[in-house]
Amino acid sequence: MINIVIVDDSSTVRAALKKILGDEKDIKIVGIASNGAEAVELVEKLRPDVITLDIEMPVMNGLEALEQIKRISPGTKIIMLSSLTEEGAEITFEALKKGADDFITKPSSFMDLFRLKKDLVTKIRSLSSYKRELEPKPLKTSISPKFDDTPMIGIGASTGGPQVVSEILSGLNKNINAFIVVAIHMPEGFTHTFAKRLNQSSQITVKEGESGEILTESVAYIIKGGKNMVVENYNGKKILKSINKESRFVPSIDLLLSSIAHTTKKNSIGVILSGMGNDGSEGVVEIKKYGGYNIAQNPDNCVLPSMPENAIKTGSVDLILDPEKITEFLNNL
């Protein structure tokens, strides 16, 4: 049984979440709070597995409560409820930086809240009930890649991804000799704010990618939230292009990495970071088929390890590295 505490200052949202989660046989709502101070008291008393935490609340806001909850009960997983605004995105990324495990965007209408059910329940189950699928193995930490043209790095991430993508990109050298494209599972609007924050903290330029844009070395392009984009060859250049192709996860890491493999061949590098599910596994297989290289984040330090573990299980991963070693490897290209 997964014990959960709901925290929101809106009685409408609390009622909706209670209905959404109350129907699940493996989820038990053990507490409900209307502000951060009440949430801290409940967590100290109940030590729940998961807490859904609103950001804007009276008495004590979500960010203040988050820091106290992490000190009181480090094992409690925290899912932030964020508004679909630029300000909401900024605060959400600050919450992730302070230790929140994931977030979900909160629509404005009561009925739209029920559309969140599948996504919210999946996140709760994944964060609280994850079981390691692979036996611990020695990390593969050394290869000497050879390229005959500028390499292209495709990075994929999901839950836990914003933190590790930030860590890796902020450590890259200003003149890194590579193209860099990042697909991270985020809603539309959030990737613009994410790219802006990363650009401020990184030596390289980081921006949200635009369809038709010609890729430039030493720039990291974040695929737009809610869009699927691929890399194509055009007049001797590499460009980004939006495509109308359905996929389980959007932006699709598989579609991005596969396109990099097809356009860049053996000069491709796939990087699979923390996340839920298996997006990216097909992509690393394609990269390996064309002679490229793949890196997976060490599952032991992922918020959710299933994405890198599923990539590793394909047999197409060359290196398994901690985030700082991924940065080091990419800087040495």
Image (cartoon, helix red, strand yellow):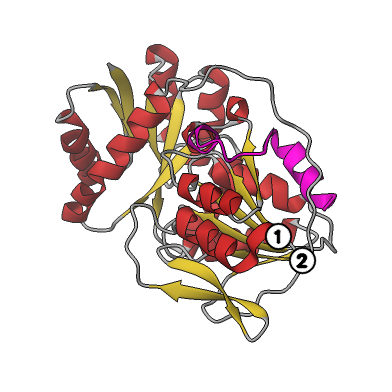
Seen at 77% across and 50% down, the residue is 330
Seen at 21% across and 55% down, the residue is 112
Whether residue 3 is visible:
yes
Mark 2 to mark 1: distance in Å?
7 Å
* Picture layout, residue 247 above or below residue 61: below
Q: Say what secondary structure mark 1 lies in.
A: helix
Whether residue 94 is visible:
no
Earlier-in-chain disc, 2 versus 1: 2
- Check contact, mark 2 vs mark 1: CB within 8 A: yes
Q: What span is colored magenta in the figure? A: 310-333
Reading the image, the residue beneath label 2 is: 150
Crowding around mark 2 (Cα neighbors within 10 Å: few <14, some 14 to 19, many 20+) is some
- Residue 220 falls in image quadrant: bottom right
Crowding around mark 1 (Cα neighbors within 10 Å: few <14, some 14 to 19, many 20+) is many
What's the amino acid at mark 2?
Answer: Thr
- Position in image of residue 303 (x %, y %): 53, 32
Reading the image, the residue beneath label 1 is: 267
Q: Say what secondary structure mark 2 lies in.
A: loop
Q: Is residue 44 left or right of residue 193?
A: left
- Residue 202 falls in image quadrant: bottom right
Seen at 53% across and 64% down, the residue is 259
- Position in image of residue 73 (x %, y %): 50, 18
Seen at 40% across and 13% down, the residue is 45
